[in-house]
Image: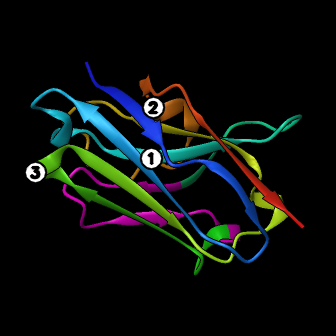
Amino acid sequence: QAQMVESGGGLVQAGGSLRLSCAGTGRTFSIYPVGWLRQAPGNERAVAAAISWRGDTTYYEDSVKGRFTISRDNANNAVYLQMDNLKPGDTAVYYCAAGPAGRRGPLRRPSEYDYWGQGTQVTVSS
């Protein structure tokens, strides 16, 4: 069972950058496909970015393409989301989530994820 802890959220002005980190526990974290999902008030949870368990394939939701970069360091059980040129519309709670162990990924739908972190708030002011 994967367990994750997110960090790196906060308040930033539009145009600024933040880097989110997801620390996975357990030796087998590297075999899980991982995603960064986000949920703004009144909106459904959606996949912003996702990465395969090997780290060789990524997926980005259209509104973040060219601004967000997902990466992973399997040797250190970590997944990152670099967010540049942030916009007020990026304001949300961001969750690190993992899919079924051994599934290649990246996973594009929230329903495909089995394990969730507690979330970290990202607020972008205009």
Q: In this view, does 126 lie to the left or right of 15?
A: right
Number of marks in the rendered image = 3
Numbered disc 3: secondary structure: helix
Dot label at residue 113: 2
**Residues under labels 2 and 1: Cα distance?**
8 Å
Q: Residue at x 78, y 67 (%)?
A: 13
Return the residue nearer the eye: 98 or 73: 73
Image-quadrant location for residue 18: bottom right
Identify the magenta region. 49-63
Task: Report how far apart the C-alphas of labels 3 and 2 lie in the structure.
Answer: 22 Å
Vertical arrangement, residue 67 with respect to residue 18, above or below? below
Q: Name which residue type carries label 3.
A: Ala
Residue 39, x across and y down, in percent:
72, 39
Q: What residue type is labelled 1?
A: Gly
Residue found at x 65% / y 49%: 10
Q: In this view, does 99 lie above or below 83?
A: above
Judge the density around disc 2: few (<14), some (14-19), many (≥20) Cα neighbours within 10 Å. some
Asked whether the residues under the numbered discs 2 and 1 touch, taking CB atoms below 8 Å apart as contact, a structural biologist would say yes
Q: Which of 62 and 25 is in front in this view?
A: 25
Q: Which of 125 and 89 is in front in this view?
A: 125
